[in-house]
Image: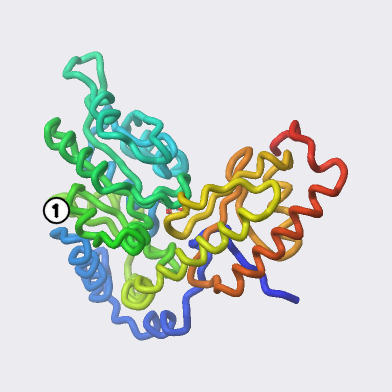
Amino acid sequence: MERIIDLRSDTVTKPTDGMREAMKDAEVGDDVFGEDPTVNALQEKVARLLNKEAAIFVCSGTMANQVAIRAHTQHGDEVIIESESHTFNYEGGGGAALSGVQYHPIKGDRGVLDPAQIEDAIRPHDHHFAPTRLICLENTHNRAGGRIYPIEKIRGAHHIAKRNGLAMHLDGARLLNASTASGIPPDRYARYFDSVSICLSKGLGAPIGSVTAGSREFIDRVHRFRKMFGGGMRQVGIIAAAGIYALDHHADRLGLDHANAKRLAQGLSQIDGVQIDLNIVETNIVVFDVSEMGIDPHHIAESLKERRILMIPFGKALIRAVTHLDVSAEDIERSIEIAADVFSSLKRRPGTNSPSRKMS
Ligand SMILES: Cc1ncc(COP(=O)(O)O)c(C=O)c1O
């Protein structure tokens, strides 16, 4: 039987043999005491990569964002955030539950906020309002199809933040994808932020782990909240070793994922009923519109699954496919071929093409 091609997310990668070797050989210690040499090496490596004073290893991208929000804010503060961002939509209400903050969501242009929108959202100094304290941006932007946040918009947001005494946090879960595609090094993006989180377990292919970087004083505060949130880990060098391996061996290959995503988008765009703007596929995420087919994206994803191609329904009209380490150029060709076949048979099948089908 043909193997499954899993395009649901870049989080699905399995550790490579080389990565498993590195994990096996990792020196470890108790990281809650700061004594794990491999964790310390990873933290120093990421701090250097982002040109920040310090960094802290955490278990997930969600935790990386949430500990940063907690360390930047006081209960009752307001956080300006893009309304399609991961932090606003998919982190379980963490901002309210863990930090007691109020998000002020603003709809961007495909995930990107204009600096003027940010300025307009800042609350006046008046006791009626929750004081604005933090701006959160996302690069690349997941729901916007892996969009690279334009650096001039980041710089504009930074100037506004400085003028108004606000902190800036970057959800850089896929920052290295942005850097690979734009040619702008990670530290050039990072300089405009007080804190930056990156994920090791997405395109980089590690099984677990994210890192948040910032000033030494900020990371010291984050340490306390990581412990408070139950994220203090012990001999975790065994996992940090996978992160070091990922940065050393997998960062340079992200361009292949981007080329695969472009080819996938181009192939899908030839299929009747699929709408996709090829110009917006900048990194490893392809989001395409199937509304013209009048078939529930869940139904389409199920039909693709029967043919061993996995993609994720993304709302009422969209489907998302993500390329990664475990997907080859040949896999992409097979996915396009099967998708074309599935889409044409779905269109022929009576009862599946009713535009009024309800989402399950
Ligand atoms: C942009 C972005 N930020 C944060 C996260 C959260 O990462 P995790 O699933 O490791 O909590 C994700 C996960 O997909 C993401 O896409």
Residue plotted at (26% across, 45% down): 169
Residue at 60%, 52% (x, y): give it.
312
Which quadrant would the N terminus be assigned to in this image?
A: bottom right
**Left or right of residue 161, residue 269 in this image:** right
x, y percentage for residue 155? 20, 43
Give the quadrant of the C terminus.
Answer: top right
Q: Is residue 122 above or below residue 155?
A: above
Give me the residue at 71% from left, 63% from top: 338
- Viewer-closest of 207 and 226: 207
Question: Is residue 281 something that shows in the picture?
Answer: yes
244 on left or right of 340: left
Asked whether residue 242 appears in the rendered view, the answer is: no
**Residue furthest to the right:** 350
Q: Nearer the viewer, residue 134 or 341?
A: 341
Residue 263, located in which quarter of the rendered image? bottom right
Q: Amino acid at mark 1?
A: Ser
Q: Position of residue 65 (x, y in %)?
A: 33, 48
In the picture provided, is 304 more to the left or to the right than 132?
A: right
Residue 345's spot in the image, x, y percent? 81, 54
* Rendering quarter of residue 110: top left
Identity of the residue drawn at 75% across and 31% down: 356
Tally of numbered tags: 1
x and y, in percent, of residue 149 in the image: 33, 47
Against 166, residue 283 (above or below) is below
Mark 1 residue crowding within 10 angstroms, few (<14) / some (14–19) / many (20+): some
Mark 1 CB in 8 Å range of ligand 1? no
Name the residue carrying label 1: 215
Residue closest to the eye, 79 or 349: 349
